[in-house]
Image: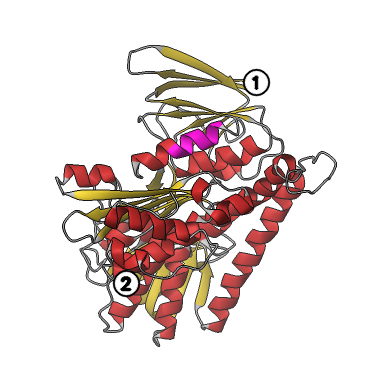
Amino acid sequence: MKYQVTIIGSGPGGYVAAIRCAQLGMKTAIIEKYNTLGGTCLNVGCIPSKALLDSTHHFHDAEHTFKEHGIDIPKPKANLTQMIARKADVVKQNTAGIDYLMKKNKIDVFHGMGSFLDSTTIQIDGKKKETITAENVIIATGSKPANLPFIKLDKERIITSTEALALKEIPKHMIVIGGGVIGVELGSVYARLGAKVSVVEFLDNLIPNMDTTMGKELKKSLSGIGFEHYLGHKVTAVDRRGKNVTVTAENKKGENVELKGDYCLVSIGRRPYTDKLGLDKAGVQVDDKGRVEVDAHLRTNVPNVYAIGDVVKGAMLAHKAEEEGVLVAEQLAGQKPHINYDLIPGVVYTWPEVASVGSTEEQLKKQDRAYKVGKFPFKALGRARASMDTEGLVKILADKQTDEILGIHIIGARAADMIAAGVTAMEYRASAEDVSRISHAHPTYMEAVKEACLDAAEGRAIHS
């Protein structure tokens, strides 16, 4: 069978690319090696982790804030089995939704391992072996958890994020290797349920890819729910004996620390998944990190083959992959879309949430760029006091001369939703004064952004 476009991989990048191609009139196929569509994000990533984060957030509130709100209930008991079951149902609903969208858009779905025989011929090894041809191919195979060479992942006690989403018991002591997004999110799931959580991070700050202020504030917040932090520590050994795991780490002074727990979550990042794709048969080049090499139009060195999402350079984010999928589809249709990679937001779904877009203060210092800073704490916000969500702050970075907003960094309730307004403002190159003069509804969390912009533009916020 011959298609105008075939996509290998059905994660957010792949299925969105398929839908957009179909909308633009192309005969489209998508290949997925697993039984369900949606990739890591819908099956063992974004969606299930948020389901558990929400469930445990409700539990934590019931345990710690309901009484103050005037809600008297018996001491709540965590039912992890039901939380996992609800998470599975959320995943099922979402993947079924993707099935529906494929049928609605008349996209042919093939289940099996797709691999190149040449640049236009793809073999699918599923329940039966099939071969299809495509004028254009989009590689959207995503990524999988990275590991250190000396760590043996048994997927029982020494686990990745995939296993952490389906535990059968609440850990007594979970040791998390890696203080990035995945580590702090899944660590907070189990800390809220009563587990002791120890985070071992090689760098000196949590969420090291974000503004340092965000990492420092998040550290304080997570300490409040029982996190221990070992920052600036290099893991040198991970050993399991029975139900016990020992993690040995070395600090910058050369001193060793030994942590003993019943689970160890390895969350040191992810690596591109290009195994068994037959890229060599298609002539597609990869870089030294295993990423597919592409140009500014996401085209590989083979003219009819494109790659998007986690398999190419850039942030490994579902929404970045989606934008890239749309970009390739529209280019194939002769349109001229664009992506501003500087304005792809990043979010950490702890509570308080952390969200960021644009430059960090550290990046501006390295650029030797003159800038000014505006801040506003959530504790000074009426809406935050009303909801008892007073942790966090908004930090605005603006050009010292022009006042153009260069970066927006939020840690606080609803930061994940608030950052969209920041992206919009920066897409239209708004100044801090522009945002500060826009009327914001009262009482809302977004007033914190207005106040931080006032602080950046004029050195004065109204309410602090």
Quarter of the image containing the N terminus? bottom left
- Vertical relation: 8 (above or below) 83: below
- Vertical relation: 191 (above or below) 304: above
Give the residue type that dot 2 points to.
Thr
Q: Is residue 220 magenta?
A: yes
Q: Main secondary structure of the magenta part?
A: helix
Mark 2 vs 1, N-terminal side: 2
Q: Nearer the viewer, residue 287 or 432?
A: 432
Spot occupied by residue 39 in the image (x, y as percentages of width and height): 51, 59
Spot occupied by residue 264 in the image (x, y as percentages of width and height): 55, 30
Q: Is residue 9 magenta?
A: no
Residue 353, visible in the rendered structure: no
Q: Which residue is mark 2?
A: 120
Q: Quadrant of residue 14?
A: bottom left
Q: Which residues are magenta?
A: 217-223
Give the residue drawn at x 44%, y 35%: 179
